[in-house]
Amino acid sequence: MRLRLTIEYDGTAFHGWAAQPGLETVEGELRKALERVFPDYQGLAVAGRTDAGVHALGQVASVEVATGPPPERAAAALNAELPQEVAVICAEQAPSDFHARHSARSRSYRYRIYRRSLPSPFESGRSWWFPRPLDEDRLAHSAELLLGEHDFRAFTPTDTQHEVFLRNVIRAAWFRRGDVLELEISADSFLKHMVRSLVGTMIEKDPEEIRALLDGRPRSEGGSTAPPWGLYLESVEY
């Protein structure tokens, strides 16, 4: 039986999703829980490998299991074995050909910037505290330019393993919610550090510079990479 797991996690204490020897990772914790609940599991896959410090509200994993609790009890059983920073919020049986990464049609991310003049302990590790002035109209214009298919090589590290840099952005907009300014962005897929690089560059450069960068300019011409703790994998569409 193939399970589809929807997972939330606070990425602050983890060295990203992917399991790494000697380091605490989300995948490492999930594998330990799976070994206790579904000893014969195999084929664990994930929609997107988040970096160290990045959070998730709707990460999706797929896994093949042969024994263990039924789907309606799987989430509770796994949560009993997971640390409090990670929670399976939904477990359901999926078609036999479902694959968390290959079956995904789009992914949505959110980046949170905390705009209050003084810091908040409740936002520490959950947003990027940025009290300096920002032109929100300029940011909104820059976000509009991202829509459609563009070459995003200016927004991913030069040592990336990606060979194709074209990505189709379906939705991109900034929203002011109290003291928090949030970028919500959806695309067919994302390059490594793409959202964080977009945020840092939009803050530093004007829209016309952003427009030029979307024509496949080198990473050296782009702006800074925003810190990971403001980024959330919000959802995955299939």
Image (cartoon, rainbow, N blue to C red):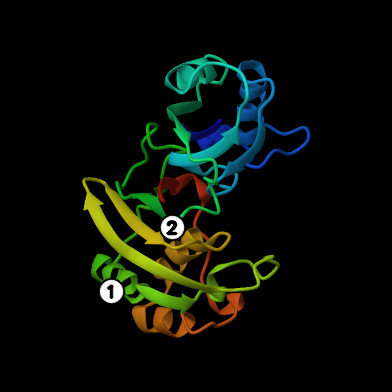
Tell me the residue at 55%/83% (across/down).
217
Relative to 220, is 197 on the left or the right? left
- Few, some or many C-alpha atoms within 10 Å of disc 1 (few <14, some 14-19, many ≥20)? some
Residue 74's place in the image compared with 46, above or below, is above
Q: Position of residue 163 (x, y in %)?
A: 65, 72
The label shown at residue 213 is none
Q: What residue would you read off at disc 1?
A: 141
- Few, some or many C-alpha atoms within 10 Å of disc 2 (few <14, some 14-19, many ≥20)? few
The foreground one among 80 and 215 is: 80
Residue 122's place in the image compared with 53, above or below, is above
Tell me the residue at 41%/78% (across/down).
210
Tell me the residue at 51%/63% (across/down).
194
Q: What residue would you read off at disc 2?
A: 105
Residue closest to the far right: 21
Callout 2 secondary element: loop
Marks 2 and 1, the one that precedes in the sequence: 2
